[in-house]
Image (cartoon, rainbow, N blue to C red):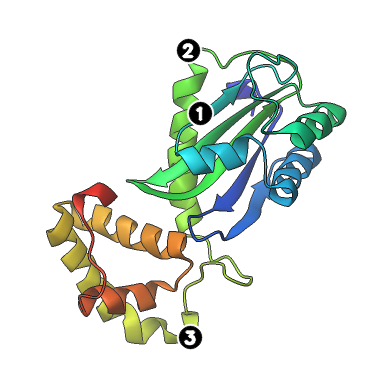
Amino acid sequence: MDALSVTGAGIAMVTAAGHRGVVCATDSLSSTIEELQLTLGEGPCVDAAASGAPVLVPDLADATDVATERWPTFLESAASAGVKAVFALPLRVGAISVGVIDLYRDTPGDLSAAELPAALMAADAAALALLYLDVDGEGAFSDDHTARSSYQMQVHQATGMVMAQVGVTIDQAFLLLRARAFADGRPLAELATDVVARRVRFSVEDE
């Protein structure tokens, strides 16, 4: 994490369907902070997921920079853990949110003019990587590996339909299809079946 001058990072799966979990963390501090937000239901990760916009807090001790009434317990616990700054970036594919990446620092300070674009690029890469994880657990997105060969054609057909509906490339259509499945907590094959049956339709707002 030296390139971004941050202490650590964590990625949380956060979707509109409410399926949440910590996917990865670079160190014990990041893991603690991610689990803290998951447990409390408050913090920059939660706000970034809800708003779809970055939540950049260069100094957690600066009351003028944070609406402390929204995160009272998180702020206290984060300070006790040694976190001084946090930068939460939503992970999105088009208009579909799949999670949040949180960057932490043990000293206060803004991301530099060069670091912010790098952080946003890292968020884009993390969003794509998250879509190709098979996350086990109740309500979490997972492909049905046992039926993979039987639904491949259905997924291809659905991808072609999404491409036509939204007017994007075949690769972009597949990412949108997979992102929607991930966000809804549904197997890809199930969503593809609904798209082919015209029970689900994509629009330009999803792009």
Q: What is the x, y in percent for residue 81? A: 84, 31
| C-alpha distance separating marks 3 and 2 | 47 Å
Q: Which of the two discs, 2 and 1, labels the residue nearer the N terminus? A: 2
Q: What is the x, y in percent for residue 8? A: 69, 33
Which residue is depicted at the point 25% across and 57% down? Answer: 173
Which residue is depicted at the point 52% across and 43% down? Answer: 49
Quadrant in the picture for residue 52: top left
Question: Mark 1 = which residue?
Answer: 119
- Whether residue 177 is visible to the viewer of this picture, yes or no, is yes
Q: Amino acid at mark 2?
A: Ala
Q: Pick the quarter of the image with the N terminus.
A: top right
Q: Residue furthest right?
A: 80
**Label 1: element kind:** helix
Left or right: 94, with 135 as reference point: left
Quadrant in the picture for residue 155: bottom left
Q: What is the x, y in percent for residue 51? A: 47, 38
Dot 2 alpha-carbon crowd within 10 angstroms: few under 14, some 14 to 19, many 20 or more: few
- Vertical arrangement, residue 154 with respect to residue 29, above or below: below
Question: Mark 3 = which residue?
Answer: 146
**In the rendering, which numbered label is found on residue 113?**
2
Quadrant in the picture for residue 66: top right
- Vertical arrangement, residue 9 with respect to residue 99, above or below: above
Q: Residue furthest front?
A: 69
Dot 3 alpha-carbon crowd within 10 angstroms: few under 14, some 14 to 19, many 20 or more: few
| C-alpha distance separating marks 1 and 3 | 37 Å
**In the rendering, which numbered label is found on residue 197?**
none
Q: Amino acid at mark 3?
A: Thr
| C-alpha distance separating marks 2 and 1 | 11 Å
Which residue is depicted at the point 48% across and 86% down? Answer: 146
